[in-house]
C-alpha cells in the first residue's frame, strides 16, 4: 500500500487534537472533565453569534455566495482595508494549506519555527514541499535565524505571533526587521490567531505594518477569542494579487453561511470580546504566578494558554491529570500547554496538580 502515496505522506502522522470531554467520558467514565487543551474561549460564543447562526438556518438549502461578498465587505470595514484584500477559509487552517498549495511545489521551500503551529509542517509535508523548521531561541521566534534559513527557492515564511505552543511574542522591532529584510521572493505570513490576548507594549499588529512589505499575509481566526472554533472561520488580509491567486485554488464554497453569520455577529459584540480578554488576562497572570511554585517552568505568555516545562516526562503527568478529569496538551517531551480556563476551571487545575506531581 505504501507506494500509493508520496514518501512525505507516508511519513505524516495525523494532527493530534485536544481530547474532547465526551471521549474522556466514554473511555474513563469521567463526566465532569474540563478541557484546557485547545485554546478555546471558555466563556463560549457570544449570544449574538448564536442568534445570528440560528437565523440563517432556513437558508441552508442554497449554496453560499461563492465570493462571500458581505462577509468580506464587513471585515474590510472593520479593519479599514480594501475588500479585495480579504480571503477567508474554513478556519485559518485551510488558508495555511491553501497558501502552500497555491505558492509552492516540491521545487520550493517553506520556513517556520520549531516548535510552532504544527499545521505549517503538516501541510508542507502533505504537499511534498521541503521546509526548514528553525529552532526557537529562549522559546521565542528568532528573526535573524529565520532570515538566515531563507533560500532562493523559499516562497513562504510563517510566524505565529503570539506563538503556539509557547505563547511568546515577537516584538515590534524584530517583526519590522523581518518584514523589511525578507527577500522579495518570500511571502511572509503573520499568523495572529491570538492577537486580542496580547497586551505587551511592544506587541505589533501586523495590519499596521502592511506598508513595510508588499508580500505579507496576515491571518486571523474566529476560533479563539470569538469562541467559534467549531464554525471553522478564518481569514487573511493580503494584497489583492495574492488573494486573487488564492481564489483560483480554493474550493468555491469553502465558507459556510452559518459560520459567516455567527462570525460577523461575534465581530460586532465588542463587549463579549472585552470580557473574554479581561478574564484571560487576570487568569493568565494567576497561572503564571501559581504554576512556578509547583515546580513548573512557565514561558511568558501573550496568549490564552501557558507553556510549562515539567522537568520530567510530560506523558505521565498528562495521563495522571486525565484520570482526574483535567485535559491539557503534551507539546514536547517534558512540556505541556495549558489553556487558561475560567476561574473555576483554573481552581480545579491548581488543586489537582500538586497531587499529580508528588
Ligand atoms: C488555533 C490556531 C489557528 C486557528 O486555526 P483555525 O483553523 O482558524 O481554527 C491558527 N494559527 C494558530 C497559531 C493557532 O494556534
Image (tube, rainbow, N blue to C red):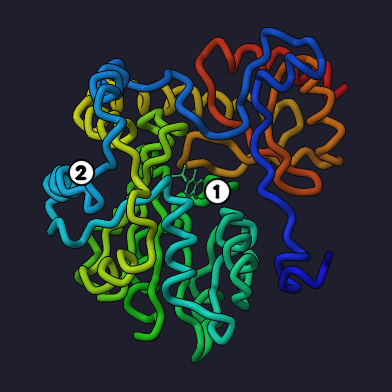
The answer to which of 142 and 271 lies nearer the viewer is 271
Where does the image place residue 150, in percent across and percent down from the top left? 52, 83
Q: Name the residue under label 1.
A: 164
Q: In which quarter of the image is residue 119?
A: bottom right
Residue sitting at x 22%, y 53%: 67
Where does the image place residue 14, in percent across and percent down from the top left? 70, 50
Q: Tell me the element at label 2.
A: helix
Q: In this rendering, does residue 60 appear at all?
A: yes
Residue sitting at x 30%, y 59%: 206
Q: In which quarter of the image is residue 197?
A: top left
Q: Point out the residue furthest to the front here.
A: 61
The crowd level at tag 2 (other Cα within 10 Å; few <14, some 14-19, many 20+) is: many
Residue sitting at x 23%, y 34%: 264
Q: Which of marks 1 and 2 is in front?
A: 2
The crowd level at tag 1 (other Cα within 10 Å; few <14, some 14-19, many 20+) is: many
Residue sitting at x 75%, y 20%: 353
Q: Name the residue under label 2.
A: 71
Label 1 – label 2 distance at C-alpha: 27 Å
Task: Confirm if mark 1 falls within 8 A of ligand 1.
Answer: yes
Amino acid at each position: 500500500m505504501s507506494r500509493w502515496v508520496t514518501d512525505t505522506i507516508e511519513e505524516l502522522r495525523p494532527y493530534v487534537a485536544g481530547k474532547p470531554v465526551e471521549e474522556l467520558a466514554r473511555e474513563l467514565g469521567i463526566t465532569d472533565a474540563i478541557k484546557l487543551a485547545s485554546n478555546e474561549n471558555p466563556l463560549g460564543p457570544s449570544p449574538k453569534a448564536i442568534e445570528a447562526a440560528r437565523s440563517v438556518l432556513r437558508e441552508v438549502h442554497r449554496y453560499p455566495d461563492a465570493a462571500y461578498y458581505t462577509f468580506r465587505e464587513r471585515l474590510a470595514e472593520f479593519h479599514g482595508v480594501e475588500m479585495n484584500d480579504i480571503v477567508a477559509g474554513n478556519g485559518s487552517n485551510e488558508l495555511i494549506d491553501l497558501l502552500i498549495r497555491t505558492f509552492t511545489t516540491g521545487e520550493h521551500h517553506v520556513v517556520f519555527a520549531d516548535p510552532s503551529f504544527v499545521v505549517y509542517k503538516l501541510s508542507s509535508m502533505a504537499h511534498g514541499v521541503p521546509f526548514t523548521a528553525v529552532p526557537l531561541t529562549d522559546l521565542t521566534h528568532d528573526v535573524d535565524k529565520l532570515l538566515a534559513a531563507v533560500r532562493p527557492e523559499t516562497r513562504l515564511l510563517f510566524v505565529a505571533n503570539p506563538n503556539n505552543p509557547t505563547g511568546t511574542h515577537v516584538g515590534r522591532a524584530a517583526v519590522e526587521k523581518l518584514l523589511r529584510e525578507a527577500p522579495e521572493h518570500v511571502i511572509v505570513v503573520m499568523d495572529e490567531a491570538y492577537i486580542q490576548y496580547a497586551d505587551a507594549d511592544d506587541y505589533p499588529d501586523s495590519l499596521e505594518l502592511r506598508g513595510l512589505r508588499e508580500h505579507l499575509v496576515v491571518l486571523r481566526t474566529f476560533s479563539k477569542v470569538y469562541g467559534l472554533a467549531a464554525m471553522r472561520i478564518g481569514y487573511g488580509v493580503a494584497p489583492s494579487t495574492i488573494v486573487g491567486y488564492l481564489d483560483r485554488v480554493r474550493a468555491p464554497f469553502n465558507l459556510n453561511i452559518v459560520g459567516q453569520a455567527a462570525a460577523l455577529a461575534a465581530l460586532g459584540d465588542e463587549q463579549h470580546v472585552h470580557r473574554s480578554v479581561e478574564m484571560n488576562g487576570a487568569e493568565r497572570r494567576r497561572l503564571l504566578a501559581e504554576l512556578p511554585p509547583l515546580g513548573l517552568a512557565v514561558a511568558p505568555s501573550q496568549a490564552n494558554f501557558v507553556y510549562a516545562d515539567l522537568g520530567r516526562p510530560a506523558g505521565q503527568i498528562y495521563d495522571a491529570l486525565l484520570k482526574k478529569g483535567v485535559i491539557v496538551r503534551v507539546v514536547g517531551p517534558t512540556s505541556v500547554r495549558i489553556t487558561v480556563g475560567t476561574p473555576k476551571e483554573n481552581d480545579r487545575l491548581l488543586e489537582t496538580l500538586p497531587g499529580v506531581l508528588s
